[in-house]
Image (tube, coloured by chain):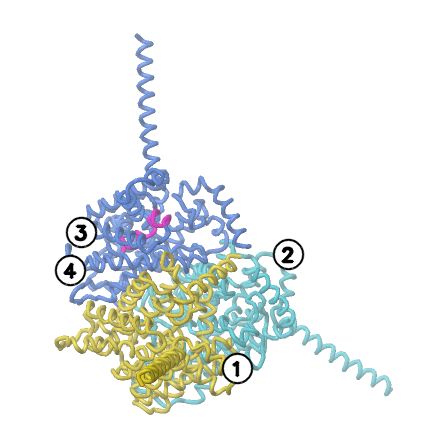
Chain colours: A yellow, B cyan, C blue
Amino acid sequence: MWIETKTEMEEASRTRASFSRRVLNGLLLCSGDMEHLDKYIKDKSFVLQLAVCGLRGVTRVILANNPLSGGLILAALYWASPWQGLLGTLGVLASTLTAVITGQDSVEVAGGHHGFNGMLVSLLMGVYSSAGDWYWWLLLPVFLGSATCVFLFSGLSSFLDRWDLPAAVFPFNIIIILYLLCTGPEHPYFPHHSIKPPGALEPNATKLIALQVIRGIPLGVGQIFACGDLGPSLLILGAVFLYSPLLAVHALLGSTVGTLTGLSMAVRHESLYSGLSGFNGALGCMAVGGFFILSLWTHLFAIASAFFSAYADIALSNLMGTVGLPACSWAATLVATLMLLLTGSLAAYRIPTGQVRAPERNLQLRSQWEAGNTEERESADV
Amino acid sequence: MWIETKTEMEEASRTRASFSRRVLNGLLLCSGDMEHLDKYIKDKSFVLQLAVCGLRGVTRVILANNPLSGGLILAALYWASPWQGLLGTLGVLASTLTAVITGQDSVEVAGGHHGFNGMLVSLLMGVYSSAGDWYWWLLLPVFLGSATCVFLFSGLSSFLDRWDLPAAVFPFNIIIILYLLCTGPEHPYFPHHSIKPPGALEPNATKLIALQVIRGIPLGVGQIFACGDLGPSLLILGAVFLYSPLLAVHALLGSTVGTLTGLSMAVRHESLYSGLSGFNGALGCMAVGGFFILSLWTHLFAIASAFFSAYADIALSNLMGTVGLPACSWAATLVATLMLLLTGSLAAYRIPTGQVRAPERNLQLRSQWEAGNTEERESADV
Amino acid sequence: MWIETKTEMEEASRTRASFSRRVLNGLLLCSGDMEHLDKYIKDKSFVLQLAVCGLRGVTRVILANNPLSGGLILAALYWASPWQGLLGTLGVLASTLTAVITGQDSVEVAGGHHGFNGMLVSLLMGVYSSAGDWYWWLLLPVFLGSATCVFLFSGLSSFLDRWDLPAAVFPFNIIIILYLLCTGPEHPYFPHHSIKPPGALEPNATKLIALQVIRGIPLGVGQIFACGDLGPSLLILGAVFLYSPLLAVHALLGSTVGTLTGLSMAVRHESLYSGLSGFNGALGCMAVGGFFILSLWTHLFAIASAFFSAYADIALSNLMGTVGLPACSWAATLVATLMLLLTGSLAAYRIPTGQVRAPERNLQLRSQWEAGNTEERESADV
């Protein structure tokens, strides 16, 4: 009896172990860049392919590339506001389809590179519109704006390619500024809220509430998608975690740095509470965390980048606020571009733009890309 | 008798046919880039050469290159206002001579590449000046501004050459903005009109007059040369038609698109009536029509480019209007530059900057430049 | 007796001649780039090396490269205001050390290329601060700002390197603008003076005093280091003269041109008296004088560059003044960059960025660098 029982227990434990190993494997399969999925859907229908590259596009905003994370983020947006979720979906579809029609590089399209700018443009148009939710005329600028992003992305990529720089979210930043300039707070068709610079003086300032400030840190991650609710923001953070735990840590760290920066510059309380102080820091931090191989050195640079992004955001917000414009993610995009151009010790850790994967995978592939990098340099020297 | 009569009639008809053929041939000789003229004037006097390259420069503004069109345009300007005509003439001469003195590439100078920016600067200085016509002191900034355009053109060309982009009218746009910033509405020596952004609210807005709006479409072509009268504008359009009927169609189409854009964004009525809404659209449309080989595909892109230019113009005008500046042709120039950078299906139709001729001739030379293009690419790859 | 006396006299005269020759030799050793010093201090302590490359950095602002001149300039700053002197010293040290820590190219660091932007940022933060001297909290932004300059310098250098352009004082100009935007006149921690544009109307304008305007010319050289006192300004001019008499002549000439420009545009009197009208002209003139081999031709270009810089400065000051920002040295930096890009006859005189020495030495080395230039071009063509 004893022997049998022992065997049974051993078997049960083995089953449990194998079950949790299978769960872990499943999770690992769903994590990272999910390159195996591309092989699987290669001969599937166009709609499925479009859905996958759209969802990849959704995650490109936060430097991730994982359709499941994209689904989670979309779910978070629908949770926060169904109208915003719809706008985001339409935006990512409109720009991806425009890219297909205008014959952009199919590998880029499949990787979601042409979706994320359109999505951001749509989301921000929705957020700034003062015509309320379900104002269907807004779909007109949403479609046009998202489609135009493809042109800007393609043109800017050609331009920046000389320095192996990505076009990043420059197209979104340009289009949304042009849209807001075209219309205006009193526009008869597309009115929008007027934007207050973070440095604006508060006539009846109250005491700062520490808990609200801390709440602003995860909100800073949500604000990347113009989402100001705690639940959806945490879901977005979870989506980043699914793609890469390291990136999620960088996001939180950057948002914290951004909030600290806001405190040091005494910005408006609302800016701190809503997470708007944090999101440029988060993006700046993630950019270094994502485009460089992790080490103590790059980690310090990521923090420096977060600080620089956050300060530059306050400066640009104050400048653009004088003409009633938001600074969007100009600061983080410019700082990240600068970081990618750096020479010195940081340059040795840089991953060529086309070879960037999830940070964990970058660490694994280090030796591999280093070899590739040397070859590339050699071919560039010729 | 009958036989004789028949012969006479045949002869008469033959003479008529040969006459109309000769007229057509003569027209064809005067149309297009008139490259045969260069051989003819090669050993003529400097003054004649200067006149021809000055007139070529006049047409470069509208992406044409034909001394007769240049003469027609100058005539239109003198017709609209003799003072403006004089300023334009002086501007094109000042900058062309500066280019000769500073030793710029002689082929470029002969092609009129150094004249058009100076001309635009002079015209716009005259238009914005509130000191009235025949204010001779204005010649001082006109000469200085036109001469400086050469430096900017040369420097920007070196910069943009990496992407095979032309410096276009960037020098004009920069110099006129600097000039307007230097002076100001209340300047003691060079006062200028204050500029109203197109999105400015009209306190006592009247009903829109359809006929006036339609009249604004040809005016949009004239506004490229800061000319707001119908007759001269039609003459300018005729000059474009002489160079290339296709380009003239693009100009009218672009101006129509620009006016539609202005309507959709509810700009000030004056902006629509005067053609100011249309001219950026016209330029954006002509740029794609001129720098790309005509096809259904590029035609659609030309319309998209016109829309984008016109919207960007409204946005930039609203932005720059906050500090009392006009947006000039910044929008069209930036959008055209972006279009030239595009990858995807449009890129295959692009003509290398140095090989651009009249659209009709580009169609003819297609096979020829494609061969040249391949060679060039090969040499660039080495 | 007579013979002896004669011999004595001859000896005395020989001694005098040899003494003055030795003095002259000593002066010549202290003049120019002092490259011999680098060999001497190569194996000395880190602190001495840091001091030398810091002092070289101080002179880089005015396109010089001589530690003794650097010492004189620092002395002038301490003379004008000990607090400003301290800020300048800390700025140059902070950015040089940051460059060492972040592993920038050691030859560049030793040449002082990473010091001058940090120094300018610190000086200007001090000048604009309205919290008064010895406000120790200011050291926080001084350190951060100076350190950030290294990142900007490194990134911009990578970017501009494609055209063999130097990053020059772009990092300083960017950082100081961001700092001023971040804070503001009413900032609780770092308040600063509000800046008046030079074109602002003066309600009770008095008659212009010619002597004060002439006094503004040497002050224009001092204003490069934000120093507005005559004595220290003259000492700074002397420091430039020690490095290169030709550069000093260009500085004075440029400042004169700038002042004339200010007069022609009727700027505020204070702007003329304080030398603020002159310093962009001086920088623009020195840039052409320093980066091109001297000839009649380049001399004329240097004057043109001074005029263009000064007019552009008035324009940019008026523009940036509308949001309460100073134009710093944006105008001169942009114009100098443009001049370096020029094609035509000027291009033949250009010295490759890495081979620039004192103007006198450039003249000597002409044949040498021309040979080098040809080689470089050949290697670039391959």
**Quarter of the image that includes the C terminus of chain C:** bottom right
Closest to the camera, between mark 1 and mark 2, is 1
Residue for badge 3: C83
Q: Disc 4 or 3, which lies upstream in sequence?
A: 3
Residue for badge 2: B43
**Amino acid tagged 1:** Leu
Seen from this angle, which residue lies furthest top? Answer: C1
Q: Quadrant of residue A3?
A: bottom left
Q: Residue at x 37, y 56 (%)?
A: A344
Q: Which residues, given as a range, are shown in magenta?
A: C106-120
Check disc 4 and report its element: helix, strand or loop: loop
Q: Chain of mark 4?
A: C
* Lateral position of residue C80 relative to residue C36, left or right: left
Residue for badge 1: B300
> Where residue B273 sits in the image (x, y, percent)?
42, 83
Labels 1 and 3 positioned on one and the same chain: no
Question: How far, Cα to Cα, is label 4 from label 1?
Answer: 60 Å
Residue nearest the viewer, comparing A80 with C183: A80
**Amino acid tagged 3:** Trp
Closest to the camera, between mark 4 and mark 2, is 4
In the image, is residue C34 above or below residue C312?
above
Check disc 2 and report its element: helix, strand or loop: loop
Q: Is residue B378 visible?
A: yes
Judged by its main secondary structure, the magenta piece is: helix
Residue nearest the viewer, comparing A278 with C285: A278
